[in-house]
Image (spheres, grey):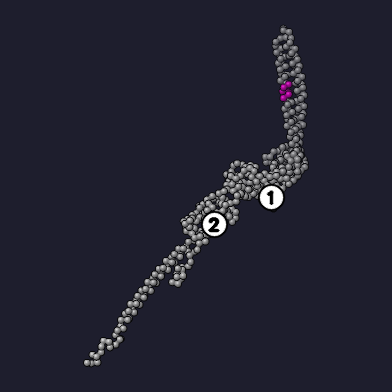
Amino acid sequence: MSEHEDQTPESIPAKRQPRKMPRLLSVSAVALVIAVAAEGIWHRQSQEKAVAAWTDAAAIPTVDIVHPTKGAPRQQIVLPGDIHAWYEAPIYARVNGYLKNWYFDFGAQVKKGQVLADIETPEIDAQLTAAKAKLNAASAAVKVRDAEAQFAKTTYARWQNSPPGVVSVQERETKQADYESGIARLNAAKADMAAAQADIDRLQSLENFKQVVAPFDGTVTARETDIGALINAGSAGNAQLFSVADTHKVRIYVKVPQRLTGNIHPGLTAELRLPQYPGKVFTAKATTTTRSVNTSSRTLLVELQADNPDGLLQPGTYVEAQLNLPSDPNTVLIPASAILFRQHGLEVAVVGDDDKVTLKKIGLGRNLGVQVEVTDGLLLSDRIVDSPPDSLGFGDIVRIASRPAPGNPPNGPEEEAEAN
């Protein structure tokens, strides 16, 4: 038996048996690669989903929420106004002539009936003299006609009472006609006398207008003439001579916007402030209105009245009138920053229970600076977006600022583990 024949299977070298190991290693390596690849694919898909979710969450705007608050039980509005005198009258001449003298300048206190100026009226003086002469002539004519009428009456009575046959009928009728004619001439003379007297009375009245007098107690607020000035009667095209104002009380006129007219009533109190008296407040009360809204300004003219014992409230003065009005119970206050100025008007963004936005139209009241009054369109329970983005629209979903916001998307297995 040869050397090779003496070898048993157990004595065969071990080098031939390990040939199966590389195959096992190859299979294991392939499986590992597949597992790693599957893990990578799964991780990438998971990360993509996380990034997509984070992106969607980050796209939702975060907003601050405010709630409307009730307005004050009373509201105060400040409106511009003008002060007018209790009585004020421009004074014009009633006769033609020349100003002879004036006695009071503007600023003077005058009493009713006090003479402000004298006017020379030579034409009226001449007409009055002629009228008096005419009256004298008419009076003399009346005396003559009266004597003639009395004589004609006596003659007619004597002829009328004559016995029948003594005086003819024709002569009796002639005397009657003379009597009736005398009466007619007497009446005509009396009429001329009355006309002459009426002309004198007219001219005498004009003579009284030579003195320009104050129509009531007050202050001379203007003097528009001087000595020697030509005076024309009437106001058409002529300058006034004086202006007198009674300022023991004053009237203040303010224009109230239409939306506030429902709260205006007589007895409403107001506080008056004038630029020339800083820190000083005057009181006034509403007395009447025009009861008609001006169509061009949509305002109601309101008259206030105030006592003016010191004369500090001067006619023509600009005044700020603060009216104390009862508030509308439906009026609420919101920040001015919550208003959206859109093409459909003023709106606010209201967040519902599902965090979706609804745009509500509102009626705007007073602008109080940081806050504004809303007269309709909102409830106290509404959740309003403060400082809304310009892109915010109806139906958009928002996140309330007090809720947690999404973090950054995970970038790897470690960050994903931390995120989980």
Q: Amino acid at mark 2?
A: Val
**Camera-nearest residue between 268 and 187:** 268
| Circle 2: element type | strand
| Image vertical order of residue 18 relative to residue 285, above or below | below
Which image quadrant is residue 106 in? top right
- How would you rate the neighbour count of disc 2 (Cα within 10 Å): few for under 14, some for 14-19, many for 20 or more? some
Q: Position of residue 352 (x, y in %)?
A: 49, 55
Q: Mark 2 or 1 closer to N-term?
A: 2
Magenta-tinted stretch: 186-191
Q: Is residue 72 visible?
A: yes
Residue drawn at 52 percent across, 61 percent down = 402
Residue underneath mark 1? 281
Residue 279 magenta-highlighted: no
Magenta stretch: helix, strand or loop mostly = helix
Q: Position of residue 303 (x, y in %)?
A: 64, 43
Residue drawn at 75 percent across, 15 percent down = 154
